[in-house]
Image (tube, rainbow, N blue to C red):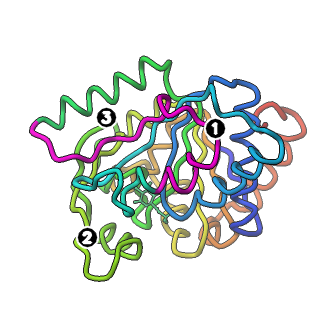
Amino acid sequence: MLVVIKESSKQVGQEAARIVANSLRANPKIVLGLATGSTPLGMYEELIALHKSTALDFSHATSFNLDEYLGLAPDNPQSFHYFMHSNFFSQVNFSPDKIHIPDGAFRKDYSAYCDEYERAIKNSGGIDLQILGIGRNGHIGFNEPNSSLASRTRLKELTQETIEDNRRFFPQGAEIPECAITMGIGTILDARRILILATGKSKAAAVAKAIEGPISSSVSASALQLHPDVTFLIDEDAAYALTQRDYYRRVLELTKKYTPEKFQ
Ligand code: GLP
């Protein structure tokens, strides 16, 4: 695991965008796994800026989003569909037919729909680079504590903590969805490379458990320890509770010196 500690959340966004842009330039047909939330917003802003200033070309790329709330239509301003379109897709040249976001519609058979989402990921050749945020309870996507580390895309019940954390995105008094469709931890671990972003003190405990704690379904991000190519890109505040910060800095220096290809 590479742990990259930046001074500010702005630098986290810039560095994440640099990694995505380099991966896209190296492989224009890249399959990206994308995340919502306030954390990756800076990355999307930077990618939009790069698209405008350097003609960074998304037209051949494919994307799969991690999750969507159950019961929110794509045109609902609180839906992740809306988030992705307004904060990213509408401002770059992604082909609409290559964008995939789980459909949060109520339906009879969630498993059949989720299997289809899994099949679409497989048929695209699999995710090359998965972007993640992390919840305060250590979740990735909406894989709440106790999610199976082998879970696939499915309907997931949200914890009260997650519902409260996400209340800030909803108008006052609005009902917050109690479930979501989310990629599973097994789905995420199938990605070839994973870039997880975290900023702010409120994420410090979850980040420390994910990186230095035992692998446990209680902290779904700890499952990333099983993956051979994970980069944690975090700011000083989110790194606050890590005990091995100096060592991580050394690892990064030596990685840049001896195996720079690992940190493109
Ligand atoms: C939601 C999303 C996660 C995201 C998390 C943190 O629960 N399902 O993918 O990582 O929020 O969001 P934020 O970046 O706003 O703190």
Query: Which of marks 1 and 2 precedes in the sequence?
Result: 1
The residue that label 2 is drawn on is 160
Query: Which of the 4 quarters of the picture holds residue 149?
Result: top left
Mark pair 2, 1: CA separation: 37 Å
Q: Residue 80 in the image: state x and y as whole percent.
A: 41, 54
Residue sitting at x 58%, y 61%: 198
Of 16 and 232, the residue lying toward us: 16
Judge the density around disc 3: few (<14), some (14-19), many (≥20) Cα neighbours within 10 Å: many
> Which label was assigned to residue 93?
1
Question: Can you name the residue that lies furthest to the left here?
Answer: 108
Type of amino acid at the residue the image marks with label 1: Asn
Residue range (magenta): 83-108
The numbered dot on residue 152 is 3
Q: Residue at x 64, y 65 (%)?
A: 243
Rendered location of residue 261, percent (x, y): 81, 30
- Mark 2 is surrounded, within 10 Å at the Cα level, by few (under 14), some (14 to 19) or many (20 or more) other residues, namely few
Q: Is mark 1 within 8 Å of ligand 1?
A: no
Question: Label 1: how many residues lie within 10 Å, few (<14), some (14-19) or many (20+)?
Answer: some
**Is 222 drawn above or below residue 188 in the view shown?**
below
Q: Quadrant location of the C terminus?
A: top right
Task: Tell which quarter ligand 1 is in.
Answer: bottom left
Picture quadrant where residue 119 is located = top left
Mark sitting earlier along the chain (1/3): 1
